[in-house]
Image (spheres, rainbow, N blue to C red):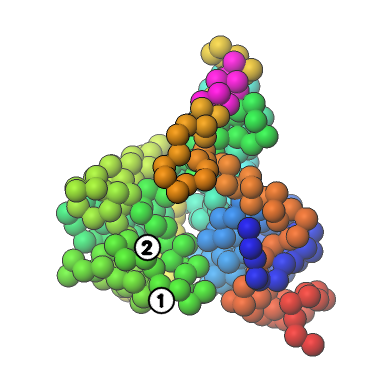
Amino acid sequence: MKENRPFVDWELMNHFMVDAFCGYGVPREDAEICADVLLESDRRGIESHGCNRFKPIYIDRIKKGTLLPVTEIEILKETPTTVVMDAHDGMGMVASHKMMKMLIEKAKTYGMAGGAIRNSTHYGIAGYWSSMASNEGLIGITGTNARPSIAPTFGVDNMMGTNPLTFSLPTDEEFPFCLDCATSIVQRGKIEYYAREGKDTPKGMVIARDGTTMTDSKDILKALVDETAALAPLGGIGEELAGYKGYGYAAVVEILSAALSGGQFMKALTGVSDDGKPQMYHLGHFFFVVDPEAYMGLETFRKTAGDICRALRNSTKAPGESRIYTAGEKEYDTWLFRKDKGVPVGEAVQKDILDVRDELGLSYHFDFEKE
């Protein structure tokens, strides 16, 4: 791996983000959860959901009033194997952490557990929550709806969010099988990353209302808000490359996120009121945890999962290709590369960090600062 951006020590970045969240009203215990979720994205190389989003998605929304820094979690319904929560527009990461803690305990007792959250906000990378289960030798499944951005097959309206459907499965290897990806061909966060880095979005990922494709990342972000463009579902535009499959899975996530929690969906999640003013996002999430011990045992599961992954990686490679990966492997390799170096930060993130530091009057110094 090559990296030309400067690195910031993991511990330093963690302390800074915790103090910054606290500076904007997030309780320290909650701030520690939020910082860890964001840093886990960067540990895995999922930079679209890491430090890149610290200021624009969380801090700016707190300041704008569309995200409450103090999370008042209400348990609406609970059974021995299920939980339904209302996050009351607080930190989605805080509510999700409490949910997974509860479901892991329930699944260890009863074999399976499921939960849903309504009136929530962005909960970071979905893989963080499913990995909480796999780290305990359990199967984790989660999904969330989001601001509308995906067009249905044969449509151009941005109707559904990028709606990840995520699985983490324990294996007998050093990392779990973790499939964490959007049901769109590209997620909004990736386009935000392209825009911040001054890069175009690859052709064919975004459709304008006239049916043409868009590539200017900044124009795309504006058009998604104006509802004059939409992301294509997994597979792409139309049916030729099976875009209807991605469309179908996005709809599954939308239904489960809203219907299990009794929450809102699609056009109600724009974050903008009918008169054009910012409002709460009211997102929904769902979670399932399964204990392999309730089936043929954890060790059987881990070995079988590992054998399958190894067989896939050892299968015949296409001409010119040097390696076949399984889900979670690239993220693990990224962590091995970065763990002793720190978080790589580009110029846009550097500016965000310094702006937040100076606004709060925090006494932090970073090596990337110009003397």
- Residue drawn at point x = 60 percent, y = 29 percent: 170
Residue 295 is a magenta residue:
no
| Whether residue 336 is visible | yes
Q: Residue at x 26, y 65 (%)?
A: 207
Q: Residues within 10 Å of mark 1 (few under 14, many from 20)?
A: some
Residue 191 position (above or below residue 150):
below
Callout 1 secondary element: helix
Q: Nearer the viewer, residue 193 or 271?
A: 193
Residue at the (61%, 28%) spot, across then down: 171
Position of residue 128 relative to residue 24, above or below, is above
Q: Position of residue 344 (x, y in %)?
A: 67, 65
Kind of residue at disc 1: Lys
Reply above or below: 135 against 12. Answer: above
Q: Residue pushed farthest top?
A: 296
| Residue at image point 47% right, 70% down | 194
Which portion, as a residue range, is magenta?
300-309
The quadrant holding residue 101 is top right
Front-most of residues 222 and 89: 222
The type of residue carrying mark 2 is Thr
Question: Viewer-nearest of labels 2 and 1?
Answer: 1
Q: Is residue 255 visible?
A: no
Residue holding disc 1: 218
Q: Helix or strand or loop: what does disc 2 sit on?
A: loop
Quadrant, the C terminus: bottom right
- Mark found first going from the N terminus, 2 or 1: 1
